[in-house]
């Protein structure tokens, strides 16, 4: 395996990590007006992701930095061509951050409700646009011979890419609903499972349509065969079907693992369908960016590989510790500090 291929695979891992972790806190935001019936319940929903949502975004920062360093041509063409879409994603993320910080600054019901709706708006908008942007890499955008973007913002939107955005939103909502059932108690927990059970069949239908269409797009627009793309598609399909069964039987942890596996399989499907290209050019397919013509020099990739081997395990250990500390269910009591939470767990007694 060459270093270019290795870093293409690592980028797939990084985007999978981002969608897997940020997916459930986007899902919680999407479901704020659906699952939460009172201000107190919405506050508890936000408490479930309060300690981890900003840490989850580390994956996005690393993925963006790794793309810039490992594939600078891909980074330059994609970020210039998708500039407005990425700016809108950034706006959605900023709105979410503000909602976390400012919702608790006032006691008036309209104040809290307004910020909750803004959180939902950002939580729907960002994953929808991520789905559109990432699927556009495969569907293709106009690229000139000098490897610059030659299209417009409207070139990102087609029936396929819009379906991708909708599929990502639904899958994140399902992931978030199951996460809420794992982290809450009482009526909020029961309501979360009911919402998950209702969302699961819809996510299956839309997700299956998107995945099958992805195989067709890869064949038609990227000169790919059905194999090996069919493998992650089959894994995703089985995972989502398992999530349907598990949510209906109220097996929360296995259902959460199943939705997480489905999300990872969707990302892997896109990357497998894309390889050996990183950005498909349409209608001039010959101008496509590939793993080879968009990558950095071997020396740069070697240095990055050494750094990743040292730092990536640290990130994984840090996030694992964070989730372990904040694993207790939220029941409406005051959360306290991380030290207080450790002291209340069996291991800290």
Image (cartoon, rainbow, N blue to C red):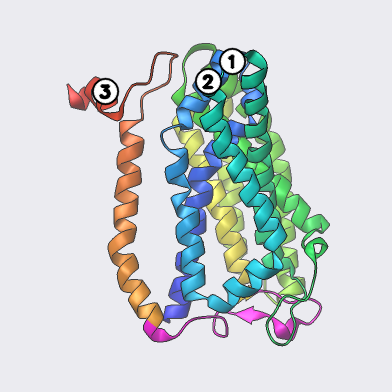
The residue at the point 75 percent across, 83 percent down is 144
Q: Looking at the image, which is closer to me, 15 or 75? A: 75
80 left or right, relative to 21? right
Where does the image place residue 150, in percent across and percent down from the top left? 77, 76
The residue at the point 75 percent across, 73 percent down is 221
State if disc 2 and disc 1 touch (CB < 8 Å): yes
Q: Label 3's element?
A: helix
Label 1 crowd (10 A; few <14 / some 14-19 / many >=20) = some
- Look at the picture and state if 337 lies above or below 279: above
Q: Which residue is mark 3?
A: 340
- Dot placed on the residue nearer the N-terminal end, 3 or 2: 2
Q: Which mark is residue 202?
A: none
Q: CA distance from mark 1 to mark 2?
A: 6 Å
- Look at the picture and state if 74 lies above or below 211: below
Q: Which residue is mark 2?
A: 43
Where does the image place residue 115, in percent across and percent down from the top left? 63, 27
Q: Label 2's element?
A: helix
- Look at the picture and state if 166 lies above or below 200: below
319 left or right, relative to 200? left
Q: CA distance from mark 3 to mark 1?
A: 25 Å
Label 2 crowd (10 A; few <14 / some 14-19 / many >=20) = some
Residue 95 location, quadrant: top right
Label 3 crowd (10 A; few <14 / some 14-19 / many >=20) = few
State whether residue 341 appears in this view.
Answer: yes
Residue at the extreme front of the image, as rendered: 106
Q: Which residue is mark 1?
A: 39
Dominant secondary structure, magenta: loop
Q: What stretch of residues is rendered in magenta?
A: 279-299
Residue at the extreme left of the image, as rendered: 349
Decide whether residue 295 is among the magenta residues.
Answer: yes
């Amino acid at each position: 395996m060459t270093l270019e291929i290795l870093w293409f695979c690592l980028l797939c891992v990084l985007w999978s990590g981002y969608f897997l972790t940020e997916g459930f806190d986007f899902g919680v935001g999407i479901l704020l007006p659906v699952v939460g019936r009172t201000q107190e319940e919405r506050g508890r929903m936000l408490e479930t992701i309060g300690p981890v949502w900003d840490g989850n975004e580390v994956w996005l920062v690393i993925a963006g930095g790794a793309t810039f360093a490992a594939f600078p041509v891909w980074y330059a063409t994609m970020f210039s061509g998708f500039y407005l879409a990425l700016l809108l994603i950034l706006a959605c993320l900023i709105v979410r951050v503000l909602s976390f910080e400012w919702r608790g600054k006032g006691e008036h019901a309209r104040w809290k409700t307004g910020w909750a709706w803004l959180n939902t708006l950002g939580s729907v908008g960002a994953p929808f646009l991520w789905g559109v942007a990432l699927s556009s890499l495969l569907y293709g955008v106009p690229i000139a011979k000098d490897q610059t973007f030659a299209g417009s913002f409207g070139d990102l939107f087609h029936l396929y890419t819009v379906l991708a955005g909708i599929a990502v939103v639904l899958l994140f909502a399902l992931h978030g609903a199951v996460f809420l059932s794992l982290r809450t108690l009482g009526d909020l927990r029961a309501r979360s499972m009911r919402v998950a059970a209702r969302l699961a069949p819809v996510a299956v239908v839309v997700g299956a349509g998107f995945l099958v269409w992805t195989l067709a797009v890869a064949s038609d627009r990227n000169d790919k065969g059905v194999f090996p793309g069919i493998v992650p598609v089959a894994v995703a399909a089985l995972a989502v079907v398992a999530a349907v069964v598990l949510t209906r039987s109220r097996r929360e942890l296995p259902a959460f693992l199943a939705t997480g596996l489905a999300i990872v399989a969707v990302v892997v499907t896109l990357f497998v369908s894309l390889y050996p290209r990183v950005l498909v050019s349409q209608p001039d397919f010959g101008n496509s960016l590939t793993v080879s013509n968009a990558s950095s020099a071997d020396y740069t990739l070697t240095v990055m590989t050494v750094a990743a081997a040292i730092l990536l395990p640290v990130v994984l250990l840090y996030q694992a510790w964070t989730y372990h500390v904040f694993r207790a269910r939220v029941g409406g009591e005051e959360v306290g500090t991380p030290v207080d939470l450790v002291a209340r767990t069996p291991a800290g007694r």
